[in-house]
Image: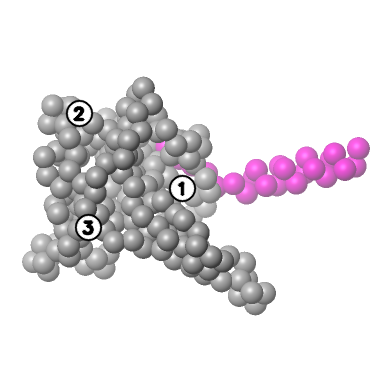
């Protein structure tokens, strides 16, 4: 009996410490004849994600009116919560990219995007493992920015695929998948994005919903 009570207590404590996942439903204008939709997975921890219309990338510290940051700003990292925004896209084939399957402070954001022109994606992640006093370590992974060209009426999942290569080494890549409501989940061709000329990154970066 005592063991059962202890287990219940531990479960309750753990559940009470779980981050809060807020979800907002937005209704942006969407015309499938001229637009596509994109879902990006990120998080309010050490993850970062952004995208911009165009075939080049800008650095995070540069001002860029075309870049949309998929987060709630720097200080959101100190909140024990995340905020997802959904606009009615089909459910992701990946359980961890669904509202009910979000892990820790992960989030998903869904966007209407223009078609017929490149979209440049920048994603990264990092983590601290244990305490440095007892052999803990930190790692990070940031692949090269990639571009893809959306097709009108299509839906896309975008996420960072992580492969562990050793105790302290990780390799990652930006994945874009074409999805639909009937279970389609096919890879989309991407290309390396060049650095934007400084003249293309002059004004303040805007934030996503």
Give the structural element (helix, strand or loop) at label 1: strand
Query: Of marks 2 and 1, which one's residue comes earlier in the chain?
Result: 1
* Quadrant assignment, res 59: bottom left
- Mark identifier at residue 28: none
Q: How far from the left and from the top, in percent, is residue 10?
A: 75, 46
Q: Determine crowd level at label 1: few under 14, some 14-19, many 20+ residues with C-alpha closer than 10 A.
A: many
* Quadrant assignment, res 6: top right
- Mark identifier at residue 192: 3
Give the structural element (helix, strand or loop) at label 2: loop
Is residue 199 located in the magenta-colored stretch of the structure? no
Q: Give the range drawn in magenta.
A: 1-23
Q: How far from the left and from the top, in percent, is residue 119?
A: 19, 48
- Name the outermost residue toward the left: 199
Q: Nearer the viewer, residue 50 or 194?
A: 194
Q: Which of 15 and 118 is in front in this view?
A: 118
Name the residue rendered at 22%, 37% in the picture: 112
Name the residue rendered at 17%, 43% in the picture: 149
Measured Cα–Cα span from mark 3 to mark 1: 26 Å
Mark 2 lies on residue = 153
Looking at the rendered image, the disc whose residue lies closer to the viewer, 2 or 3, is 3
Residue 68 appears in view:
no
Q: Determine crowd level at label 3: few under 14, some 14-19, many 20+ residues with C-alpha closer than 10 A.
A: some
Mark 1 lies on residue = 106
Query: Of marks 3 and 1, which one's residue comes earlier in the chain?
Result: 1
Picture quarter with the N terminus: top right
Query: Of marks 2 and 3, which one's residue comes earlier in the chain?
Result: 2
Measured Cα–Cα span from mark 2 to mark 3: 24 Å
Q: Which of 130 and 2 is in front in this view?
A: 130
């Amino acid at each position: 009996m005592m063991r059962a009570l202890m287990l219940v207590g531990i479960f309750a404590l753990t559940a009470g410490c779980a981050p809060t996942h807020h979800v907002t439903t937005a209704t942006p204008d969407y015309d499938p004849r001229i637009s596509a939709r994109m879902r990006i997975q990120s998080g309010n921890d050490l993850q970062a994600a952004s995208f911009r219309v165009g075939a080049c990338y800008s650095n995070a510290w540069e001002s860029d009116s075309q870049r949309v940051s998929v987060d709630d700003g720097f200080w959101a990292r100190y909140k024990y919560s995340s905020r997802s925004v959904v606009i009615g896209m089909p459910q992701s084939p990946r359980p961890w990219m669904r509202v009910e399957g979000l892990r820790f402070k992960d989030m998903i954001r869904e966007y209407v995007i223009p078609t017929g022109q490149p979209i440049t994606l920048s994603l990264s992640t990092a983590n601290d493992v244990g305490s440095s006093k007892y052999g803990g370590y930190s790692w990070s992974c940031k692949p090269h920015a990639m571009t893809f060209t959306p097709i009108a009426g299509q839906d896309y999942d975008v996420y960072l695929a992580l492969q562990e290569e050793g105790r302290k080494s990780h390799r990652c890549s930006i994945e874009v998948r074409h999805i639909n409501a009937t279970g389609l989940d096919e890879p989309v061709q991407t290309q390396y994005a060049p650095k934007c000329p400084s003249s293309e990154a002059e004004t303040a970066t805007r934030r996503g919903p």
